[in-house]
Image (cartoon, rainbow, N blue to C red):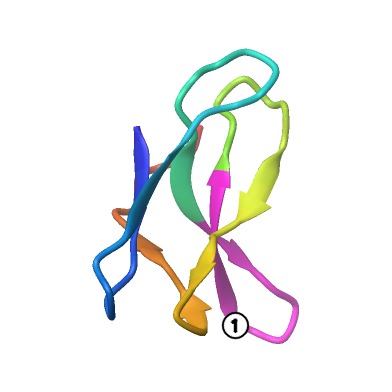
């Protein structure tokens, strides 16, 4: 399960796909300017989301290889 945790307050969230209820996989999206954005993606191709925010910054999650 993709778990994000706030480095400041410790709050965490789990993410699943709303269409197939499969746990999302953590990953990084490479932008054209060379920066990376943390994301979670449905392994069944239903889409991806940017990581959640908490305490004014992106929550972090363990990165898994996306298929």
Q: Is residue 24 left or right of residue 60?
A: right
Mark 1, residue position: 35
* Front in this rendered view, residue 10 or 61: 10
Q: Is residue 23 left or right of residue 36?
A: left
Q: Is residue 4 above or below residue 56?
A: above
Image point (65%, 50%), residue name:
49
Q: Is residue 55 above or below residue 66?
A: below
Residue 11 percent across, percent down from the top left: 31, 61
Q: Quadrant of residue 10?
A: bottom left
Q: Is residue 24 left or right of residue 61?
A: right
Image point (52%, 29%), residue name:
16
Q: Quadrant of residue 50?
A: bottom right
Residue 56 percent across, percent down from the top left: 51, 84
Q: Is residue 17 magenta?
A: no
Element type at marker 1?
loop
The segment highlighted magenta reads 28-40
């Amino acid at each position: 399960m993709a778990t994000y945790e706030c480095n400041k307050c410790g709050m965490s969230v789990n993410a699943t796909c709303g269409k197939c209820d499969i746990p999302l996989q953590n990953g990084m999206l490479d932008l054209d300017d060379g920066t990376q954005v943390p994301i979670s993606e449905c392994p069944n191709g239903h889409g991806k989301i940017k990581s959640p925010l908490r305490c004014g910054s992106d929550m972090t999650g363990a990165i898994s290889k996306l298929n």
